[in-house]
Image (cartoon, helix red, strand yellow):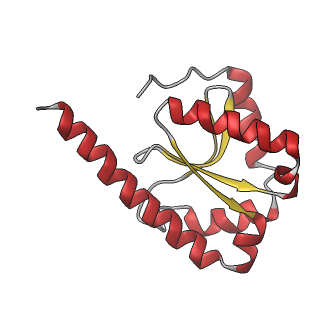
Amino acid sequence: MSSKPRTNPRVVQRARELRQDQTQAEEVLWRALRDRRVGHKIRRQHPLGRFIIDFYCHQAALCIEIDGDAHSEASQRAYDIARTQYLEDHGYRIVRFTNRDIQQNLQAVIDEICRTIDLRLIELSESTNGQDH
């Protein structure tokens, strides 16, 4: 795992602005995730390097992205692939959901997030234990 990417202060400021201007899907999911309601601390609009992650669980190094209709465009898909690769190269795991996923089956999204966090914590624990030997 590479070191955490450095975060530009302008990215931090933009993240603060985005917290005040969430999409409807982000707002719905945030109400379900905030205040450790899923047993883990989740941050919203969290800066990582030059990127802003929709939702982030530091303990599991998990990035949770909510994709709107714009993400189906070819240029945006290419950007998302490059961004995902960059973040994975720095040791983060990324899960993606669509606005429709949140609107139509919020509980399934929450269950998947919790399952992914649990699996990720096991992975991280095993990789840490493997380094001790």
Instruction: Mark yes or no: residue 54 visible.
Output: yes
Q: Nearer the viewer, residue 6 or 95?
A: 95
Left or right: 107 in relation to 132 = right
Res 77 → quadrant? top right
Q: Give x and y (percent) for residue 52.
A: 68, 38
Residue depicted at 39% across the width and 52% down the height: 120
Residue depicted at 61% across the width and 26% down the height: 49
Query: Compared to 104, does 52 lie above or below?
Result: above
Left or right: 10 in relation to 106 = right
Q: Give x and y (percent) for residue 22.
A: 78, 54
Q: How many marks?
A: 0
Q: Nearer the viewer, residue 92 or 57?
A: 92
Left or right: 119 in relation to 38 = left
Check the picture and name the quadrant holding the N terminus: top left
Q: Give x and y (percent) for residue 130.
A: 19, 37
Check the picture and name the quadrant holding the C terminus: top left
Instruction: Mark yes or no: residue 16 visible.
Output: no
Residue depicted at 71% across the width and 56% down the height: 66
Query: Compared to 106, does 75 lie above or below?
Result: above
Q: Residue furthest left?
A: 133
Q: Give x and y (percent) for residue 96.
A: 64, 56
Res 132 → quadrant? top left
